[in-house]
Amino acid sequence: MSVLVTGGAGFIGSHTCVELLNSGEEIVVLDNFCNSKPEVLDKIRQLTGKDFKFYEVDLLDPDGVEKVFAENDIEIVIHFAGLKAVGESVQKPLKYYHNNITGTLILCEAMKRHNVKKIVFSSSATVYGNPHTVPIKEDFPLSTTNPYGSTKLMLERILTDLNVADPEWNVTLLRYFNPIGAHKSGLIGENPNGIPNNLMPYICQVANGTLPRLNVFGDDYPTPDGTGVRDYIHVVDLAVGHVKAVERARELDGVNIYNLGTGTGYSVLDIVKAFEKANNLKIPYVIAPRRAGDIPACYADPTKAKEVLGWEAQYGIEEMCRDSWNYMLKQKEN
Ligand code: NAD
Ligand code: UFG
């Protein structure tokens, strides 16, 4: 039996495929490459020495999705496939609702037809909105401020409703905090198109001279140095969290929700300093106005993941900065 990985060619999906294969799981991968490249699949094979079946299928294509289930003995689905740019989701809400919600409904319908009722879903800390306190526990109130976040919250509810209607549905909701870093080999990582929105890819492009300086969005937040605080987590730690979630889903029933973060918050300036130290580089920056929609601080209480999944992040912030930059350097070489 196999683990179906939707969005397996993407940033978090590709690292998860590597960890699944390394832990002895059989996988089938589905992706439409709307935000990734086919070469990633060969890198996964190269890193693990293992092969797997791949389907270039759009989740919005019910026949394509049906074929994947008809041709394989799928036990559980890890569902990464989705669009994730917060700003774009505000500009193009229909695109986001259609891709993320309709795509997931088509996936779940195929799962139901084939009696596959275990799913691990990529949710996000964005479902906590602007939390009243930090660290954030899984039972904190939920709210969203943009269409991307709303798709995550709606999908959490849709999957929970499936379990209410039929308790055989086994649903794991993983709420990621801020994934950065890359595989140590530098063969897979995050490579956004155009000017990056997120902090670490932006810093990497300042470091390699593509962008002149970092704009630090606000230094007047109620945080120790006034800049925004987040829980950055190494993508390999996150990938290992998925392996643990799959193993645990085989034993537990119902809907299980876990924060996947380190539990430590770092400010924007902490990240600049850590990047400079880890890579022996200077990152020029200026203080710019706050970015609309940003919150002061967001970091996890990861106790539940430790207690129930037996999972805890292993990598520190300097390793995250080193591996992000190493990936960028390797990209240049290729
Ligand atoms: P990514 O864009 O690198 O990966 C997503 C993959 O899904 C891509 O390969 C893309 O081609 C594919 N995809 C998208 N729509 C598809 C469709 N309709 N059919 C088939 N394939 C499709 O993103 P990522 O950073 O790896 O994120 C993976 C998941 O985790 C997403 O659901 C994202 O919303 C969620 N998440 C990401 C972050 C983050 O900061 N990276 C944080 C929280 C949650
Ligand atoms: N920041 C800057 N300058 C930049 C980019 C970011 O100062 O050029 C700051 C932001 O203001 C924020 C911090 O760096 O304080 C992190 O910003 P990111 O854009 O990297 O990440 P966010 O926390 O805003 O959002 C990320 C994902 C969302 C997800 C959210 C919670 O992009 O999809 O984490 O998981 F919803």
Image (tube, rainbow, N blue to C red):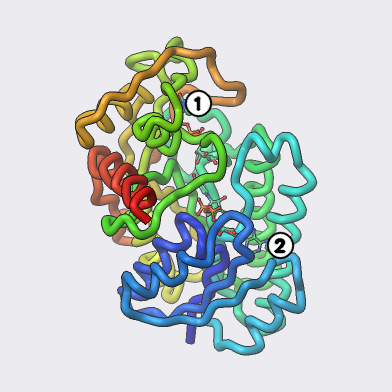
Image location (x, y in percent) of residue 223: 38, 17
**Residue shown at the point (46%, 78%) measured from the top left:** 27
Tag 1 or tag 2, which sits nearer the N-term? 2
**Which one is in front, 319 or 230?**
319
Q: Secondary structure at mark 2?
A: helix
Residue 22 is situated, as x and y percent measured from the top left of the image, at: 31, 74
- Residue shown at the point (79%, 46%) measured from the top left: 94
Query: Is label 2 or label 1 in front?
Result: 2
Tell me: is circle 2 under 8 Å from ligand 1. Answer: yes
User: What's the residue at 38%, 54% (across, down)?
Assistant: 238
Q: Is residue 216 left or right of residue 81?
A: left
Residue 21 shown left or right of residue 39 in the figure: left
Q: Which residue is mark 1?
A: 132
Extreme residue toward the front, this view:
333
Q: Is residue 223 above or below residue 103?
A: above
Q: Which residue is mark 2?
A: 103
Which residue appears farthest toward the right when viewing the image?
94
**Other-residue count near label 2 (Cα within 10 Å), few / some / many at <14 / 14–19 / ≥20:** some
Of 46 and 7, the residue lying toward us:
46
Is residue 255 in view? no
Q: Label 1: few (<14), some or many (≥20) within 10 Å?
A: few
- In the image, taking residue 139 as reference, residue 157 lies left or right, namely right
Q: Amino acid at mark 1?
A: His
**Residue 116 placement (x, y as % from top left):** 60, 79
Which quadrant is the C terminus positioned in? Answer: bottom left
Vertical comparison of 79 with 283: above or below = below
Residue 5 x/y as whole percent: 52, 70
